[in-house]
Structure formats: C-alpha cells, structure tokens
C-alpha cells in the first residue's frame, strides 16, 4: 500500500519554515554552514540555501558530507560507490554547522556524520534539520528542525522524492 | 552495483564495476587531499599482506591503504621459492583463517596461487591478487587506469578512444596482461609493442593491436607504458643485448620529442634507468610515474572498501536504513 | 581347486550372443555347442570382453608407496577391468636392473589378481646418459620386452638410435615419451591462447611432434619397433599416420583423458588438470579421436599416475603432473570414442585388449576371446550409469580429473585365469 504523506506544496512550506527556524535560532546567516547528506539531503540543503538567500539576501555556505565510509553497518550492506563530500573553503572550524537529511530514522546516519565532522575539525555548534522524522531512534540523537513528524511502523518505508533526482516532489509511505 | 567477491584478475570486473571502483578511488583521493587522512571504515577488520615474493613497494601501498581505512594489518612475508618450499600455501591459509583474517592480499611467484587460495575453501574472506607469477596484477592495472583517467579524462567517465601503448616484455608481464584487458574494457585502444620473442603465443586473440616497432606510430599515443625488462631474459635468448633492446624499444629523449602534446609516460616500477626508459624520459614533465605510486594507495583503498563491505549472504540486497 | 563353468547368455563385442566354457583357467569352448553339463552362470546379455591390457601404468612401488603400491594399483586395475598392466620404471630405485624388474614382477604374482609386467628403463637411472642393462632385464624372470624412460624423453638422438637397435636382439620395443626437454623447460600446460592468458609457461605441440618425427625416421633407419606413449597433438597423429603409410614399425597410444579433456580446464588453476603431456585443445582432441578411428593410434593406455593429495593441493606450478586412470578408463574411452560415434565397440575393445598385448609381446593375450586363451575376462554392463567418485577408488590416490562425472559402462565382474577377482562390483581377491 502506498500513501502520499507530503505533497509538493507541503514540502515547500516545510523547507521555508525550517529555513526561518534556522535563521532564528542562529541569529542570522553569517556563521552558518549547511551540510547536506547525499543524496537527497544535498537537494534539501540547496533549497534551504535558496530560501535563506530570499529571506536575508545572503548566500550561506553550503556543502555535502558523504558518511558512507563512517557507517558502522558496512558488513550488512552491499558495496556501493561513494558520494561526494564537499567542504567549502575555510572548513568547519568554528562554524554553526547544520546537517541536513531527508529521513531521520535510527540515528545511525547522523552518528556517522558526527564522526565524519570530528575528522574535519571542531565546529561551534552542530544542528540537525530533517524533512521527515519517522521515529524508531536507536541512539540518543534528536533533530533541531523537523519538516514533519510521521509515526510509522518499522516495516514501512518512507520515500522522499525530490526534483531533479526524481520526477516530482513528494513523500510517500509504503508498506 | 555488483562487485566481485574476490579480485583475482581483471576478468572479475565489468566495465561498470571497474568504473565504479575508479570513481570510488577518485572520491577517496579528493577526501584525502583535504583534511581527512584516516577513515574509520574498516575499524576492527584484519587485513593480511601475504607476500611470497618480495615487493616492498606493493606491500607498503596496500598497508598504507588498509591503515588509512583503520584496518589492522598483519604482514606475513613467506620466504622461499617454488622449489625450496617450507609451509604449504594451504597450511599458511589455514593459519591466517585461524587468526581471523578478514581479507588476504596475496603476492605469489606462481600464476594462479590467489585463485587457488580463493577457490580451495581454505579461507573465508575475500582474496586480493597483488601480483601472481606471470598472470595478473589487477590493482596495478587499476592504478594505471586511474592515473591515465586523471590526466587525460579529468577523473570521470571512461577511456574511450584513447590510444595507449604498452612497450616491452609482454610475455612475462602480469602488469601487461591486466592492463590490456582493463584498459580495453574501459574503451582505450591498446597497442602492445615488443620484439616477437617477448609476445605470448595467441596474443592475436587479445583485445589489442600488435606492433614490433616503437617508432612506427609513436606520435599517435596518448599514453605510453614502458615495462621493466629483466636482465635474465637476455641469457634466455629473448633479445641479444640491452643495447639493442634499448635502441629499439627504450623510451629516450629522441622519442620523447616526437610524442603528441599532452601524452604521458607510465612505468609500473621499479625502473631500469637507461634500459627501457632513460633518465630524461623518466624525470620529464610527461612522466606520471610518481603519480602512479600515489594513486596506488587510493585505488587499493577503494578495492579494500568495496570488497570488505557487505558479506556474501546479503550482497544481493541492500539493507534499508 | 580348478573349476569348470559356463558363462551363458553373454554378448560379445561383435554384438552376437554366445556362451563361453572355462576349464582350469582356460577358455575351452565358445559358442552354443559349448559343453552342457557344467554350472551355468547367466550373464543376462551383458558384454563379455577379454580383460584389458594397459601398456602404461605407474605403480609407484618401490619408492613412493604413499601414492600407490602393487597391491593397491592392481586392485584399481581389477576395478577397471584390467587383467594385465605394464608398470613404468620411474620408481625409486628406477627399474633399470634385472633385480628391480623381478621384484615388481614377483610382487604382482603375489597379489595374484592381475598380471604385472614391468617395463624396463632405457637408460641407467632414466638419466638419458648411458643404456641400462636391457638384455639382463629381457632375460630376467620378468622377461621384459618393453623399455621406456617414461617421464623423461630419450632426447639424445644417438642414444635413441642405439636403444632401438639394441632391442632388436629380442624383438623388443622402445616406448618413447616424446618431449623435447629444451622446448619444455618449466612448462606447465599446453602452449596456446589459454596458457598465455593464464601466464603459465607453455608446452608447445612441436616439442612432442619434433621428437616423434625424429624417432620414426630413426626406427625406419635401423628397422626397429617404436612405440609412442600418450600422443596428445593433432600434429603427432599426422606424423604417425605418415610413418605408418611408409611402412615404419611404429605404434601409438592415447590416454582416455586426452580424448575428453582440453586445456581450458587449466583456467581453474586446479592442478588436478595438470598432466604430462598436457591437456591440449578441442582440435587436438578431435584429431586424436580420428587417429584412433582410422588406426593411426593403435591403443588406449591409461598413464595411470597416482599422486598423494598434498602433491595436488597446492599452487599449479608446484603441483605434480599426472592423473589416475585405471578405474575410469573404459567408461571414459567408451564415452569419448563409441558414444561419440567415432569408433565401434569392437574396435575399442581391441584397442584395450589384443592390440596392446601385441605391442607388449604378451603372447597369451594376443588372440583375445579364443579357445586355449587364459580365461581372463570382463563382464561389463554397458547401460549402467555411474558417477566417478574420487572418494571411492581402489587406488591409494584420488587425483582423478573426472570426479563427479556421470558415465556409462561399468565393469561388473572380472575373471582372472578362471578365478573371479571381482564379482558384481566386489573385489574378491
């Protein structure tokens, strides 16, 4: 069974709201660094960057952080090629880093991301923005900015679709 | 992407998986170029360097690659030739298995020894061929392909249409075998250039052109790889003298000046300066020989990462999370 | 106790039904008019052949009893339907004196389940330097008629010439292992596309063919008898064909494995496929089958070469050359030659019985199933399918390349000089 949980407009609204919240929390865009987690986290980060630019008239720093090599479940996963890690010049030292991902589930991805950040330097703060929080945390990690809280069962699958990787925007629940 | 369980020969790779491996190596090179020197990927895993043949450079390259991925490395340097054998390959393998080796990197003087290790059921983990006899040396070919791609194809895509020459002792070269099959699979047009005595019987059936004359078409190549020539081949009557070999098949200043612009020179090392390549060529701006060494580490990191992630049981399906 | 009995309802290789009476270990009558007042054994239409004769077996005793002994090797022979096996001299010590050949001969007699006929070395220690005491071996109790340095080639042309001349004294034969040593130094497998791809040192066909060409000319020149061991290449078949057409006294053998397997198996790097001469190409396999079909190749010989497990459980270049073959010989040859349509059953039986007996001067086996011949017979179920299993062999060694292969044609019972040595698959002696 497939159910649409968020439609195109709802995703836009959520991204806009998250962008406002990020600005509010950090009192402006100056020290911000948005780091998307590939693949769809990067698209979300780009959208948030665009929203912030529209609100503040400033382009905040943007990058990507592939956490594949930091995962603790490599033994359980089929081998796959790496995604790009792109850290803007200046690095993460002293910045307010916002990690951005599409679905927040067990928390292991974020743990891996925190490990990866640790290799890169020492940010002032690390915050987390996600489009969907579906629960079932396995680690003591929480999100700072959430597009939508979506109660799910473990067997269900949440699929976030974003242009241009996918044909149209939408979040569906399968299972 | 489907990735093989072992890396024994280039035949284990498809164009798709070889490209994915090179892409992974390229990403690892980028990351390592920045601040990240060490990744936690293989923490808690034990990788064994099982070397039956001396090769400090290959062993160190694998060791560096494994350590940058946080694996524990055991160096097992077995002495002896095929004649004066001590412990058998089987007993060595059983010992490594008992010690909990998660992967075995093997260099052996006997062609096919890595495949025996992989097929005989003596060890459970992946086997990586680090050069076997006159058979194959797949990671060397991968690092050569990586280096060529880096210089001539901007790290992306394939080697489609590139003209690549491999010059020298093709008959006895595992590097040549792996390269001919890998480079051609990636779209390059490979030409082997050697005296007829140093070409294997039946090479006509391989995916390469054959030439006896280096000067004939030297202008057309985008990359030229010189192979190490061993002096003992002279005593075995494969060629009459180093001087004659070098005159006809050596890379030198004269030939360097005839290369097309942008063409690069490769050599798998160690070099016999003055025989298959002279100092002027080896140290020229066209030479990427030092890059090859650097790139070897990234390619081997990619191989270790891809072979050691996943277990055979669930390779088929990616676990969701 | 000598017994008299009659095998009834037997099928001969010619296809006809017949009965065979055995008295005191000898065939006393054949045909429907055979004696009627004796015990009858109903063979239910199964094939009866003379027991096979193998001109090329390695028994490894003395010296390598961990691989094979006369006892285990003769059991393997019986399992395969062989009533006489010629034991190659590359033992330790080499069978190059009357003493060693008599030892092997008497060990065979003690076992008493098939004839063991020693082959003498051509040169001392098989070293290819000076002739062994050939006459002493010929005149010994073993009565050696076949001489070979098998495993080594008699590569020195002058020494080969002398050996060919010398065996004329007693109408003997030199069995040559044709392999030019210089062209095959460290060689591992057939030289061709596969060896080049695998990086295993190649063994060119010409290394075999050049020696055969030289030796047929030498045999012609001195008017002696030459036998070529285990032909493996198309070119070898052509040379022997030419030599026979010219009237040269040359005979030739081929092994079952060379009639079925090719060098592509080396791609596994599993040394179970490592053998001397090496497995060749598809084209060679077909030429060998054609050679048997037109009589260029006279006989099937096993080159049964047992090796202990550790000699094969290693990397290819370190492994020993050789395969066991006695127990599967008939089934493999039947599949490669008769089932494939190359050869009649009758011709295959001749190539495994009377023809090798003639080459080896085994006088009482030359005429096959005839009155007065020793009652050394096989009962074979041609329809029976079975799977070759390395873990269920009589040989001490298990290095068969055919493990797991399903074949047709099982030797069920074997009569050796009138006594059952195997009955319905059970070895009795």
Image (cartoon, grey):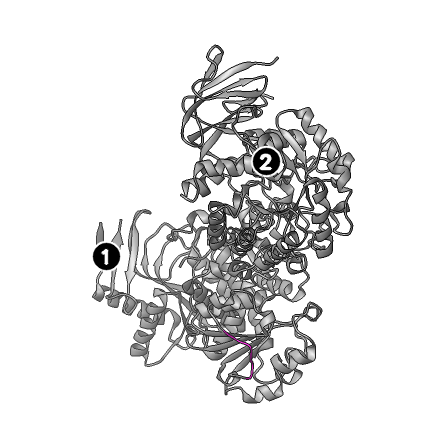
Looking at the picture, does residue C283 appear above or below residue C428? below
Q: Where residue B150 sits: x, y (%)?
A: 49, 76
Estimate how packed mark 2 is, as few (under 14), some (14 to 19) or many (20 or more) residues with alpha carbons within 10 Å: many
Q: Nearer the viewer, residue B84 or A124?
A: B84
In the structure shown, which secondary structural element does the residue marked by tag 2 occupy? helix
Q: Chain of mark 1?
A: A
Instruction: Identify the residue at horizontal 25%, vertical 57% (top origin).
Output: A172
Q: CA distance from mark 1 to mark 2?
A: 89 Å
Q: Chain of mark 2?
A: C
Instruction: Identify the residue at horizontal 74%, vertical 39% (top origin).
Output: C95
Left/right of residue B84 with respect to residue B211 in the rendered view: right
Q: Is residue B284 visible?
A: yes
Q: Which residues are magenta?
A: B210-215
Q: Is residue B72 magenta?
A: no
Left/right of residue B182 with respect to residue C315 in the rendered view: left
Q: Is residue B35 visible?
A: no
Instruction: Identify the residue at horizontal 63%, vertical 38% (top origin).
Output: C360
Q: Nearer the viewer, residue C195 or C163?
A: C163
**Quadrant of the image for the N terminus of chain B?**
bottom left
Discs 1 and 2 lie in a common subunit: no
To which residue does mark 1 refer? Answer: A5
Looking at the picture, does residue B22 appear above or below residue C235? below
Dominant SS in magenta:
loop
To which residue does mark 2 refer? Answer: C357
Q: Where residue A137 sits: x, y (%)?
A: 39, 51
Quadrant position of residue C13 = top left
Q: Nearer the viewer, residue A10 or C48?
A: C48
């Amino acid at each position: 069974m497939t159910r649409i949980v968020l439609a195109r407009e709802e995703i836009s609204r959520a991204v806009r709201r998250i962008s406002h919240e990020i600005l509010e929390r950090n009192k402006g865009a100056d020290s911000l660094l948005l780091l998307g987690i590939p693949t769809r986290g990067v698209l979300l980060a780009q959208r948030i960057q665009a929203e912030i630019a529209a609100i503040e008239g400033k382009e905040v720093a943007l990058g990507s952080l592939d956490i594949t090599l930091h995962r603790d479940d490599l033994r359980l996963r089929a081998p796959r090629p790496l995604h790009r890690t792109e850290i803007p010049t200046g690095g993460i030292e002293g910045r307010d880093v916002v990690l951005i991902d599409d679905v927040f589930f067990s928390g292991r991805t974020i743990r891996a991301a925190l490990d990866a950040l640790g290799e890169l330097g020492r940010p002032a703060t690390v915050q987390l923005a996600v489009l969907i929080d579906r629960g079932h945390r396995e680690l003591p990690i929480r999100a700072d900015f959430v597009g939508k809280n979506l109660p799910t069962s473990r067997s269900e699958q949440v699929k976030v679709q974003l242009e241009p990787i996918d044909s149209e925007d939408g979040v569906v629940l399968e299972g | 992407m489907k990735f093989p369980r072992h890396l024994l020969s280039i035949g284990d790779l498809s164009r798709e998986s070889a490209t994915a491996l090179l892409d992974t190596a390229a990403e690892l090179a980028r990351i390592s170029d920045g601040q990240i020197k060490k990744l936690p990927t293989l923490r808690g895993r034990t990788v064994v360097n099982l070397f039956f043949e001396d090769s400090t450079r290959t062993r160190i390259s694998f060791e560096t690659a494994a350590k940058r991925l946080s694996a524990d490395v055991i160096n097992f340097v077995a002495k002896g030739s095929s004649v004066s054998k001590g412990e058998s390959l089987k007993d060595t393998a059983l010992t490594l298995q008992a010690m909990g080796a998660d992967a075995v990197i093997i260099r052996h003087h006997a062609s096919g020894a890595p495949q025996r290790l992989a097929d005989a059921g003596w060890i459970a983990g992946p086997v990586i061929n680090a050069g076997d006899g006159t058979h194959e040396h797949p990671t060397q070919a991968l690092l050569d392909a990586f280096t060529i791609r880096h210089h001539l194809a901007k790290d992306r895509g394939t080697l489609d249409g590139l003209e690549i020459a491999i010059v020298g002792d093709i008959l006895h070269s595992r590097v040549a075998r792996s390269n001919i099959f890998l480079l051609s699979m990636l779209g390059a047009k490979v030409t082997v250039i050697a005296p007829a005595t140093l070409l294997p019987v039946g090479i006509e059936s391989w995916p390469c052109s054959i030439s006896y004359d280096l000067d004939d078409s030297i202008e057309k190549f985008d990359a030229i790889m010189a192979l190490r020539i061993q002096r003992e081949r002279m005593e075995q009557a494969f060629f009459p003298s180093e001087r004659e070999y070098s005159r006809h098949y050596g890379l030198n200043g004269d030939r360097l000046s005839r290369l097309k612009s942008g063409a690069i020179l490769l050599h798998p090392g160690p070099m016999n300066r003055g025989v298959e390549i002279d100092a002027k060529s080896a140290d020229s701006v066209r030479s990427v020989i030092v890059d090859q060494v650097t790139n070897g580490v990234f390619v081997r990191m990619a191989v270790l990462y891809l072979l050691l992630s996943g277990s055979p049981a669930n390779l088929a399906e990616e676990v969701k999370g | 106790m000598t017994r008299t009995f009659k095998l009834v309802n037997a099928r001969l290789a010619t296809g006809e039904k017949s009965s065979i009476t055995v008295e005191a270990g000898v065939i006393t009558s054949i045909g429907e008019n055979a004696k009627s007042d004796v015990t009858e054994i109903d063979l239910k239409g199964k094939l009866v052949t003379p027991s096979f004769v193998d001109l090329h077996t390695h028994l490894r005793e003395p010296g390598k009893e961990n691989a094979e002994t006369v006892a285990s090797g003769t059991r393997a022979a019986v399992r395969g339907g062989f009533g006489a096996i010629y034991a190659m001299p590359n033992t330790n010590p080499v069978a190059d004196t009357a003493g060693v050949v008599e030892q092997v001969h008497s060990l065979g007699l003690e076992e008493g389940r098939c004839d063991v006929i020693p082959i003498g070395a051509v040169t001392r220690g098989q070293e290819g330097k000076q002739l062994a005491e050939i006459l002493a071996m010929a005149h010994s109790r073993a009565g050696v008629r076949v001489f070979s340095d098998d495993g080594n080639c008699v590569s020195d042309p002058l020494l080969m010439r002398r050996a060919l001349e010398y065996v004329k004294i007693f109408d003997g034969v030199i069995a040559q292992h044709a392999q030019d040593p210089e062209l095959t130094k460290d060689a591992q497998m057939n030289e061709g596309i596969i060896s080049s791809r695998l990086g295993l040192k190649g063994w060119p066909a010409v290394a075999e063919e050049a020696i055969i060409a030289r030796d047929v000319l030498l045999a012609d020149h001195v008017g002696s008898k030459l036998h070529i061991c285990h032909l493996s290449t198309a070119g070898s078949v052509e040379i022997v064909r030419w030599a026979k057409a010219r009237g040269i006294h040359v005979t030739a053998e081929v092994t079952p494995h060379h009639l079925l397997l090719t060098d592509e198996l080396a791609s596994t790097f599993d040394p179970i496929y490592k053998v001397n001469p090496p497995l060749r190409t598809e084209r060679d396999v077909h030429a060998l089958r054609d050679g048997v079909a037109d009589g260029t190749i006279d006989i099937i010989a096993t080159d049964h070469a047992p090796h202990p497990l550790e000699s094969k459980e290693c990397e290819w270049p370190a492994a020993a050359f050789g395969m066991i073959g006695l127990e599967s010989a008939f089934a493999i040859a039947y599949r490669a030659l008769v089932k494939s349509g190359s050869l009649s059953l009758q011709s295959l039986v001749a190539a495994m019985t009377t023809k090798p007996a003639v080459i080896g001067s085994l006088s009482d086996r030359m005429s096959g199933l005839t009155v007065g011949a020793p009652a050394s017979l096989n009962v074979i179920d041609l329809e029976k399918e079975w799977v070759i299993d390395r873990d269920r062999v009589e040989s001490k060694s298990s290095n068969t390349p055919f493990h797991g292969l399903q074949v047709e044609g099982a030797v069920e019972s074997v009569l050796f000089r009138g006594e059952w040595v195997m009955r319905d698959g059970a070895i009795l002696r």
